[in-house]
Image (cartoon, rainbow, N blue to C red):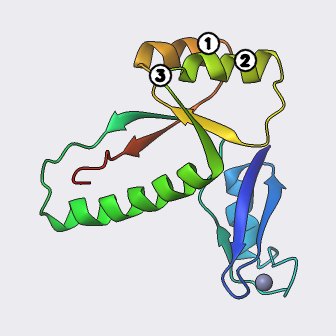
Amino acid sequence: MIKYNLVCKKCDLIFDSWFASSLEFDKLKKKELINCHSCGSLRVEKNLMAPKLISKSIRYKNRKKDSFNYKKIKKTISKYQRFIKNNFDYVGENFAYEARSIHYNEKKTEKGIYGTASNKDLKELKDEGIDAQVIPWIENESN
Ligand SMILES: [Zn+2]
């Protein structure tokens, strides 16, 4: 099962929905079986993914700063970053520790967490059945 955060392009309603797989989502979408809970519009799209655990271990350095692609990617990443900053608690280097406490102690938290983790940490977490989403991250360059 996979949970998608969906957004209605017509009335801006954001809601969660479960699907058997990402393939199922595409199939239902094609058949126009996914519509907005509020206005019934078919213009429903996947919102930014909202996994519980996010590690910002990959960093985009300033290289190719001026190229079009970089700007485009950067814009997308900035959008993610804003979303994450608003919806997740920053735990910094304690990411692996916090991820485990949520996983094992069923620490009740509405918010997900984000922070930094090494590849070794991520591999260990994965071995323990804790899946963290790794997303590209741009550090604030100027201010
Ligand atoms: Zn709607």
Which numbered disc covers residue 127? 1
- Mark 3 or mark 1: which is in front? 3
* Residue drawn at the location 35% of the way across and 64% of the way down: 75
How much space separates mark 2 and mark 3, taking CA atoms? Answer: 14 Å
Q: Amino acid at mark 1?
A: Asp
Q: Amino acid at mark 2?
A: Ser
Q: Is residue 78 above or below residue 116?
A: below
Whether the residue carrying mark 2 lies under 8 Å from ligand 1 is answered with no
Image coordinates of residue 24 in percent, x first then y, are 74, 57
Image coordinates of residue 41 in percent, x first then y, are 78, 87
Tag 3's secondary structure?
loop
Tag 2's secondary structure?
helix
Estimate how packed mark 2 is, as few (under 14), some (14 to 19) or many (20 or more) residues with alpha carbons within 10 Å.
few
Which residue is denoted by mark 2 in the rendering? 101
Look at the numbered discs 1 and 2 and tell me whether their residues touch, using CB distance below 8 Å.
Answer: no
Q: Is residue 79 above or below residue 113?
A: below
